[in-house]
Image (cartoon, rainbow, N blue to C red):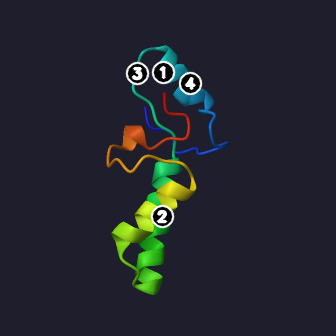
Amino acid sequence: IYDAAYGGLGAPSPLVAQGRTAGLRAADGLGMLVEQAALALNRWTGAPLRDVRTAMKRSVGLPQSDDPFDSDSGAD
């Protein structure tokens, strides 16, 4: 399950929580938000995408993994 919602940091959305309770892999939209912002900043400023992405993920406490299911604010 991939929920585009990215509510509170550290707490999964209800959909993500229900999916995990059902034994499914689930992620919220925080990783998607970070990726969209990183791409925009890269295009606006020319800053290296890898550096921008790394800094943004670090700033919100996300792992540096490319797996979208590792990129949610309520990771197990």
Residue 32, above or below 67:
below
Task: Return the mark for residue 55.
Answer: 2
Give how far apart the Cα atoms at labels 2 and 3 are.
29 Å
Tell me residue 57's x, y (percent).
48, 56
- Between 32 and 60, the one lying in front of the other is 60
Would you call the spot at circle 2 few (<14 residues within 10 Å), some (14-19), or many (20 or more)? some
Name the residue beneath numbered marker 1: 20
Classify residue 11 by image quadrant. top right
Tally of numbered tags: 4
Task: Return the mark for residue 24.
Answer: 3
Q: Are marks 4 and 1 in contact (CB under 8 Å)?
A: yes
Residue 28, above or below 60:
above
Q: Quadrant of the N terminus?
A: top left
Would you call the spot at circle 4 few (<14 residues within 10 Å), some (14-19), or many (20 or more)? some
Identify the element where label 2 is drawn.
helix
Q: Amino acid at mark 3?
A: Leu
Q: Amino acid at mark 1?
A: Arg
Identify the element where label 1 is drawn.
helix
For the point 51% across and 15% down, the residue is: 21
Of marks 1 and 2, which one's residue comes earlier in the chain?
1
For the point 62% across and 37% down, the residue is: 10
Give how far apart the Cα atoms at labels 4 and 3 are.
10 Å
Tell me residue 41's x, y (percent).
48, 76
Give how far apart the Cα atoms at labels 1 and 2 are.
28 Å
Of marks 2 and 3, which one's residue comes earlier in the chain?
3
Identify the element where label 3 is drawn.
loop
